[in-house]
Amino acid sequence: MALLQIAEPGQSAAPHEHKLAAGIDLGTTNSLIASVRSGEPGTLPDENNHHILPSVVRYLDDAVDVGASARDAAQYDPLNTIVSVKRLIGRDVSELKTLGSQLPYDFVDLEKPVPRIRTVAGDVTAIEVSSEILKVLGKRAEDTLGGELDGVVITVPAYFDDAQRQATKDAAKLAGLNVFRLLNEPTAAAVSYGLDQGADGIHAVYDLGGGTFDISILKLNKGVFEVLSTGGDSALGGDDFDRVVAEWIMSQAGIRDDADHGTLRHLMDLGRSLKEQLTESDSAKVSITHEGSEWSGAITREQFNELVDPFIKKTLQACRRAVRDAGISKEEIKDVVMVGGSTRVPRVRERVGDLFNTEPLINIDPDKVVAMGAAIQANVLAGNDTDGDMLLLDVNPLSLGIETMGGLVEKIIPRNTTIPVARAQEFTTFKDGQSAMAVHVLQGERELVDDCRSLARFELHGIPPMVAGAARIRVTFSIDADGLLNVSAEETTSGVKAQVNVRPSHGLADDEVTEMLRASIDHAEQDVKMRQLREEQVEAQRVIEALKAAMSDDADKLLNETEQQLLLDELQKLIDISGSADIKKIKDGIKALEKASEFYVERRMNNSIQQAMAGHNVDEFK
Amino acid sequence: MLDFSQNYFELFGLPADFRVDLEEVSLRYRDLQKVVHPDKFASASEQQQRVAMQSATLVNEAYEVLKDSLKRAQYLLSLKGRDAGGENLTTTDGAFLMQQMELREALDETRNAADPLEALDNLLDNIKTAINEQIAKLTILLETSTEEDLDAAMESVYKMQFLKKLYSEAESLEAELEDMI
């Protein structure tokens, strides 16, 4: 593994070693795991040869059931059976209420940032429920591939906000998975299609899943997928189609909406079944027995279309906005890729086809296309695809801003900015001697604080005493390649680094995650320590190997003899302690080597940038 | 240290010129990201990942400026010692102010037009033409560094800001009208 993977022909650094990597589509209704084997991406089946895992988790007294059998139990054990947990992840109770769907669960801890659901096995968060699904998939991959996974790529809706992304990552951590990257679902689908067809140009990906909708506009150019814009609704999907049909049945059959959980669940199932029948036929029959009386009726496709049209219309509005944000005209879009089970609905295909004036592409199974794209990306990130040229450049879906006077939001990073990105904003004090200040970070497009989503509140402490308005506090907001926000702050006149206390408005604090991890492992204390030690040893090994590989590559070119000797000495120090059982000692050793080699890492980066640009002749465009 | 002292043009290996070949800028952008992007370091040490993220962030920032005519003009002016980003810009060009008022009135009236979307389409075209006029001016003005030309360039940037703001307001209205259909 090279420190900087500069692809210089004939200078491959370490001998090639295949790493186990997988892509996971953690869906609202169904989840899948896929991997690249012998160069081909494919989804992995369970022992019964089922590829799709229903995203349903049922808690029993002493066990957790995930998948089809859990789904079948939803009707008679609705309180302990969590379906569509993706709709809950990263959200608080007030948001859950506005989601519109009737949630048949017993929520507790309503005042906490992360609500919990009461089950026979105890109170659980959406993060823990999701981690159960991830555990099953992770195990399936390790059984099939025959070894421990080095890392996974997990897909999320492009329109997921910071809290939802963070929660998804926490779920993976709980499931014991190393996350290479969170990948946006439409981008993953584009990878499946793009590499398959090798078509350079601008493409749209319309992704309507069970509970989320995304539209992305991408430019594909020689293996580089550049997302131009993205839009959507993280609470709109096929579930809404089911629900609106269920409501139609209720109104026809005279069932009140305060019916019991089991009946409501049954109605949703009937709604889904009718929707699926109407994909093939022009009408479908339905009957239901409620409180002793039976009702039967039929629904035509026209009636169904009328019921779902308002939802489809919302998706088309998002499509038009995405096209506008991309700075292109509709005519420039070569084709539209359909992703997600809900794009099987004929009305959806018809309306999308009309909007883009082209026949939507459906040649890859819309259920599997996302997982396969994630597998391809995981394979690349694991370093297995050494001669590949693929690169994904994604954007942040929602604007990021801060609260200013009068409850208004000032945008700092506008939506559809390519990530990673960093923007700084300067603040000052408004009282003499003020030593702290509060910053409220929001995500969304609206102007008022109340209409945006509160991401976090930061308190800056340790500002040196000065007269009002004299301090210059520079707060840097950065979004990393996973789309996650980080904040740092510095008082620039004195150089004092203000301490940032992050209090996520919707997420779990780090120690809560650790606590859950501890609780999920038997013999907690001991095992957690062992795990930490192993992780630290692995990281030490990584640092050692990387530096060795880098030096064998270009030390003679970039370092003088003194520098080389210095690095070799530091390297030996870490090698000597890397086998120790002292976590802190290894940690400090890694830090020391990293500090010593920092100039070299950066010099290599600069060098590779220069090399990349050296290939272009400055005169060629004059 | 990472060579953050390079300006964006140097980073992209381009001459510091207002005229750029956008295709060439994109090509270089992609080639740079292929080298620095954090995805190329997914299995590397945390330190390398950090450096990769900083580098990719810098390359993104540079690309954002180089591909956008207004930002590029502002950036070039800043390289020539002028602050064209703040509110310290003005114009005394009466004809321009008049044109502004007319465009703004036209925007307000589109809602009442017989075919609002068509009226809006025409308006967007008109604003675009006005923006292109400023781009043409800037191309000449930014070739030199005389104080006079830089003053004029500052004024042009001010006008562009105006026009771009109007353009995005017209686009918002277009979105609103389309959503009502």
Image (cartoon, coloured by chain):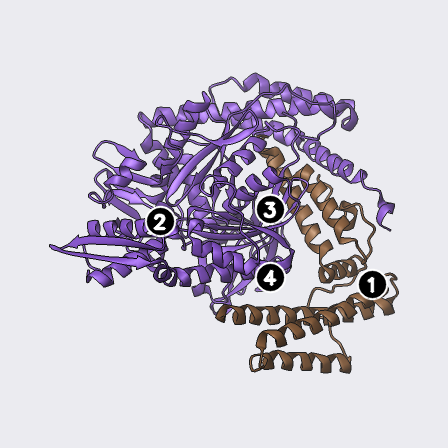
> Amino acid under label 2?
Glu
Q: What residue is drawn where x is 37% and y is 44%?
A: A29
- Residue A80 falls in image quadrant: top left
The crowd level at tag 2 (other Cα within 10 Å; few <14, some 14-19, many 20+) is: some
Who's brown, chain-wise? Answer: B
Output the chain of dot 4. A
Mark whose residue sits in front, 1 or 4: 4
Gap between marks 3 and 4 measured at Cα: 22 Å
**Residue A444 x %, y %:** 49, 59
Residues tagged 4 and 2 counted as in contact (Cβ below 8 A) = no
Query: Could you say which disc has been placed on residue A276 in the image?
Result: 2
Pointers 1 and 2 within a single chain: no
> Amino acid under label 4?
Arg
Q: Which residue is mark 1?
A: B139
Query: Could you say which disc has been placed on residue A420 in the image?
Result: 3
Output the chain of dot 1. B
Residues tagged 3 and 4 counted as in contact (Cβ below 8 A) = no
Output the chain of dot 3. A
Give above or below for B114 relative to A41.
below
Question: Left or right: B121 with respect to A351?
Answer: right
Give above or below for A139 relative to A464.
above
Gap between marks 1 and 3 measured at Cα: 31 Å
Who's purple, chain-wise? Answer: A
Where disc 2 sits, the SS reads: helix
Q: Nearer the viewer, residue A4 or A592?
A: A4
> Amino acid under label 3?
Pro
